[in-house]
Image (spheres, rainbow, N blue to C red):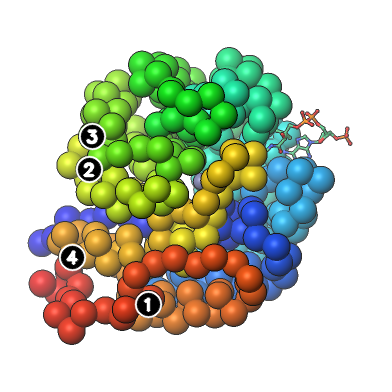
Amino acid sequence: MSETAHVREVGPRDGIQMVKTMLTTERKLAWCRGAAAAGIGEIEVTSFVPPKVIAQFADAEEVARGALTIGGFRPSVLVPNLKGAERAFALGLPQVNYVLSASEAHNLANVRRGTEESLVDFGRIAALRDQRSGPRIALASGIATAFGCTISGAVDEGRVVEIARRLVDMGADEIIVADTVGYGDPGQVRRLLKAVIAAVGRVRVSCHFHDTRGLGLANVTAALETGVRTFDASLAGLGGCPFAPGATGNIDTEDTVFLLEQLGFDTGVDLDRLIALRREVESWLPGERFSGAIARAGLPKTYRHARAA
Ligand code: COA
Ligand code: ZN
């Protein structure tokens, strides 16, 4: 029996934050439908930010409602504050992903307040979640710029661990350790993830890597060594934070699935279907930079699903 690993598609959120084309709601939902049909089990489908901050997400409610009707995968949404969480809770989504930054400077640029204020806001969100009746909503929190910041440089690892611990103490069900600007390397990933897991091991710890400096997949293997089994990725390697200077794409979903399967982890994903979807998504986004080796070179003749091996 092979061990399972999870790839969460974040293309309909992170992937389209900086693209020039406004995708229609129907195409965003086609992305979700296609990824789910290819076997992706979790998708971050949209972002509950004000449309004046990121116009791409003006249809967030419609996308989230539509995603809930598709079925076959677990939809989540990104929220930057209490107001965003209220919008998400109202729709009955099973999971909501909050975001704050370990870097004070990036937190100020991204959500216009300090990291401590964002932590207080998370406490309010968790309290609101706990007061609600109905099925329990899972609350994740991303810790952005956990490996360094393009505005302020180095980020203290002890600070990242402290933030993770405080989020879990307040009710976080998952910690998403995020390399927003692609500063992390495998040694740093091994060190930081070990420390975060030791501090909050009772909740799921996942990783969100950007491949800005080419170490994205190396960082995945390093995180696997520490026990991480959930990775955010974006089809065609799209993505990037508009409020982090120099940010570029997430690790590519197809390449991440390929790596995990080659290492013997069952992702449940059909790569041929995923590559077909990627081609479709590429056709919707003229002029964007796409990355990923598997879509370019094709799967090797020797490729076998981990489940079949
Ligand atoms: N959704 C919709 N509207 C929101 C909102 C949300 N999540 N949060 C705030 N608003 C509205 C407020 O109601 C207010 O509306 P009004 O002007 O009509 O009264 C207005 O937006 C300003 O609210 P305020 O609380 O002062 O927000 P702000 O201007 O300080 O901006 C954030 C703070 C967090 C909303 C903004 O910085 C943001 O959206 N950041 C996210 C950036 C991002 O997505 N980065 C990439 C992902 S990591
Ligand atoms: Zn990101």
> How far apart are the alpha carbons under marks 3 and 2?
7 Å
The residue indicated by pointer 1 is 296
Q: Amino acid at mark 1?
A: Arg
Q: Is mark 1 within 8 Å of ligand 2?
A: no
Label 4 with label 3: CB-CB less than 8 Å: no
Q: Position of residue 76 (x, y in %)?
A: 54, 50
Of labels 2 and 1, earlier in sequence is 2
Vertical placement of residue 38 versus 67, above or below: below
Q: Residues within 10 Å of mark 3 (few under 14, many from 20)?
A: few
On screen, residue 228 versus residue 50, left or right, reads left
The residue indicated by pointer 4 is 262
- Local secondary structure at mark 4: helix
Which residue shows up at 26% across the image and 49% down it?
A: 218
Quarter of the image for residue 62 reads bottom right
Nearer the camera: disc 4 or disc 1: 1
- Local secondary structure at mark 1: helix
Quadrant of the drawing holding the C terminus:
bottom left
The residue indicated by pointer 3 is 187
Of labels 1 and 3, earlier in sequence is 3
> How far apart are the alpha carbons under marks 4 and 3?
22 Å
Q: Amino acid at mark 2?
A: Ala
